Image (spheres, rainbow, N blue to C red):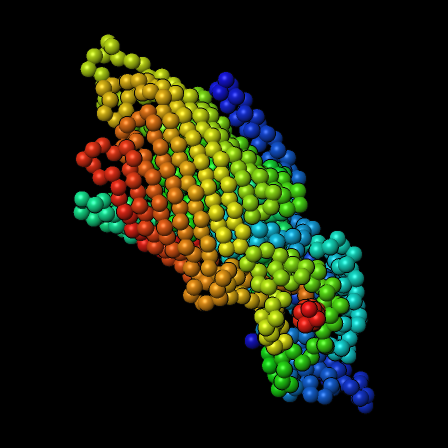
Amino acid sequence: MDRQRRFLRLRCLLLTSVGGIAAGATPSAAEVSQVCSAWNVTRSIEVLTASDEGVACQVRYRKPDEGALDQILWRSSNSVAFCDQKAQELASRLTAAGFRCREGNLTETAQRSSDLVSTGGADDETPAEGFDQRDADSGASALLAESSRPSGRRVYQRLSGGSDTKSHFAGYADATFAAADSGDEATTSFFTATFNPLFLFQYKDIVLLEAEAEISVDDDGETEFAIEYAQVDLFLHDNLTLVLGRFLSPVGLFQERLHPSWINRLADAPPGFGHDGVQPASELGVMARGGVSFGRTLITYALAVGNGPTVAHEGGVVFEAGGADDNSNKAVSGRLGFLPVPYLEVGGSFLVGDVSGVDDEMEASPDPMAALAPSSANVSLWGADASYTRGPWDVRAEYLSVTRDAIATSFAGSNGVEILPDLKLEAWYAQVAYSLSDITSHPVLQKVEPVVRYGEYKVNGLDELAEEAAEKRVDVGVNYWLAPSIVARGVVGWRDFTARPAGEPSSETRYMLQFAYGF
Amino acid sequence: MIKMFGILAGGALLASTVAIAQSAVQSAPDSSASALGKDVDLTRGAKAWADHCGRCHNLRSPSELGENAWDVSVTHMRTRASLPGDLADDIKAFLMYSVQSKTADAAPIEKTAAGDAYAHLKPGDAERGRELYSQTCVACHGANGEGAFEGVPNLMIVSGLLSKPDEILLANMINGFQSAGSPMAMPPRGGNPDLTDQDLAHVLAFLRTQIEEKTGDRRQK
C-alpha cells in the first residue's frame, strides 16, 4: 500500500509540475514511470496522460534492452486511476518474477543497460506524444538492431534472475487394475500402483544430478522400493555428456525412453522388455553420450562401461545394475542412433561382457568331492530399433538377441554347481498407435488413440525360464488423453505361452485398466 | 579381450571425466550466461521442441512449467535423448520465452469505455507482416501457412481458423491458443515476446492477404 501511495503521490506531483510548465499549451501530457531491472534487462512501466479525445490515460510498457517495440497495454477514456492501478499490478508481477522496481526515469538506465547488452533499441527520446510515436522511432530502431543479427538468433535473458543451483521435482505415477482369464482356471484380478518421483538438481550448465525412485505396490500387496537410477551428468561439451553412477541402460529404446507409464502407449511392457526380460534395464558405471546435428539430421551415440549382467536365480541372465561386479570383467554396451529427419529414427545396440557362475551353499552337491567349480561365460547382445513418430502416428519396432555361453553354476533346483548349456534369448515387438486428433476436432474423439502391438519372447537352452517367460502376445488398447501427460487406458492382451508343460494353461487373456500421470 | 577392453575403456572414460570436468569447472561461465545470455535461436528452438520432444511423448504446453523448471527439465532431456547442447539451449530459450510471455508480458488489453480492445492498433501492414511471419511463425506454420509438420493446423483453409473475427484471432495470438485436434499449443506471441500487438496485427494482415489470394486462385481455376 505504501508503495502504491508513493507512486500515486509522485504522479500527482509530476502532473502538477508538468501541467504548470505546459499551461496554456494545447495538449498537456505527463509521464510517471517505474523502472524494473533484473540482471542486465531493464523495463519501464509508464502512465501517460494525454489530451487525446476519448483517452484519459495509457499504460506504456517498454523493453529497450530486449529490442522489443513499446507496447500500450491499457488505456482508459475516463479514469486515470485505472491506469495507475494496472501499472502497479504489472510492476507487482514483474517483482514476483524477479525484477526490482523503483520509481524513476528509463532514459539513463536504458543507456546503461544498452552498454551491457548489444541488443540495441534503447530509446532516448521522451515519448511525450503518446503511443503514436512509438512506431516511428523506438520501434524502428529496435527492429533495425534485431535485423542485424543472424536470422532468428537472439540473446536470451532470464526474466526471473537465476541462481547457480536449480532444482525440479518431476516423475510419474499410475494405478492399474488387471484381470487374467486362463480358460480352465478361475479368473484372477488385482490392483497395482506405482509412484516414481524424480529429483533433478542442476548446477549452472555443468552438472545435473538425477535420481528416480520407484515405489510400488505389487499384485501380492507388497510395497517395494527401488532406485531406478541415480546419476551425475557432466556436460563437457555440446556433443559430449559424461554420466556417472547408476543409469538406465542405453541399449534399445523401451527401457530408457518409453517405459514410464505416461509415455508407454500400453499398460505394460512388451514380452521380454520388462524388468526381468532380455533388455538391459540399468547399468552401474560410466557412460559417454551425446549427439551431433547436421541441419535436421541427428546422429546420437552412447557408450557405457559398467558392472554388467549377472547370473539369475533360475540360471538365466539378469541385466539389472548390481551393487557389486560378479567378476573383474567390465561390460561394454552402447547404442548408435540415426535420425535422417526428426520423425524417423533407426538405431543399433550392443552389449558384451561376462557373467560368473555362483556356488550357492543352499544347493550343495551331495558329493563334495565331485563338485564342479563355477565358471564364467561370455554374454553378448545385439539389437536394432526403428521409430516413426510423425503427426498422429507413433510406430515402433525393436529386436534384441542375447547369447550366453555354457556355464557352470548353481541355480534354483540344481544339485550344487551344474553345467548349463548355451542360452539364447530373443525378443521383439512392433507397435502402432494413431491419434484421432488428426481426423476429428470432436472434443472427446480427438483425445482417443487406438494402439495395437504384437510381441514375442523366445528362450532356448533353459527350460525353467522358457516355461515361465516364453510367449507370443497381441495387445489391443485405447488411450484417452485427458491432458498431454495424463492418460486413462484400457487394454486387452491375448497371450500364448509357447513352452508351458502339458497340464498348465497355455494361453491367457488379460484385461487391464490404467490411469497414468506424468508430472 | 573383453576384460582388457573394458578396463581400458572404463579407465579412459574416468580419466577424461576428471580432467575435462576440472577444466569445465575452472572455466565455468557465471550464472547470467547459464542458458541465458547465450546466443540462441528461438525459431530453431520452437521447431526442435516439436520435433524432438514429440519423438517419445506428447508435447506439454510451455505454460505447464516455470522458467527454472524448463531449464532443468530440458537439461535432463538433453542427456536422455542425446541432444546436442546448442539444440537443447534453443529449446530452453523457446520454452522459457514462452513462459515469460505468459507470466509477465501477456498483460491482456482490457476493454474500456473506448470500446474495441484493439482499437488503438493501426491497420495491419501485410508486407511488414510477411517479414515478421518469416522470422518467427514460419517455424511451425510453414512458409505457406499450411503447417510445417503434422499436428499444426492449416491456416489456409477457407472458412477455417482465419474466418474468425480479428479481435478473437489477435487475442489468440497474444495469449496463446490450443487448436482443436492439435497435439501442441501455440505459445503466447508465437513464443516470441518481442512481438508487439501491432506486430501481430501486421502478421494477421499478411495471413488475410494470403488466404484471399488463395481464394482468388481457386476462383480463377
As displayed, is residue A412 above or below residue A76? above
* Residue name at image x 68 percent, y 69 percent: B221
As displayed, is residue A434 above or below residue A139? above
The extreme front residue here reads B221
* Residue name at image x 35 percent, y 32 percent: A458
User: Which of the 4 quarters of the picture holds residue A465?
Assistant: top left
* Residue name at image x 47 percent, y 44 percent: A396
Q: Give x and y (percent) for residue A72.
A: 68, 75
Q: Give x and y (percent) for residue A420.
A: 31, 20
Q: Nearer the viewer, residue B110 or A455?
A: A455
* Residue name at image x 46 percent, y 54 percent: A434
Q: Give x and y (percent) for residue A113.
A: 73, 60
Q: Is residue A178 left or right of residue B82?
A: left
Number of dots carrying numbers: 0
Q: Is residue A257 left or right of residue A124?
A: left
As displayed, is residue B58 above or below residue A251? below
Q: Nearer the viewer, residue A120 or A136?
A: A136
Q: Give x and y (percent) for residue A251.
A: 47, 35
Q: Is residue A354 visible?
A: yes
Q: Is residue B132 left or right of residue A284?
A: right
The extreme top residue here reads A369
As displayed, is residue A37 above or below residue A367? below
Q: Nearer the viewer, residue B138 or A280?
A: B138
Q: Quadrant of the C terminus of chain A?
A: bottom left
Q: Is residue A438 left or right of residue A515?
A: right
Q: Is residue A256 visible?
A: no
Q: Quadrant of the N terminus of chain A?
A: bottom right
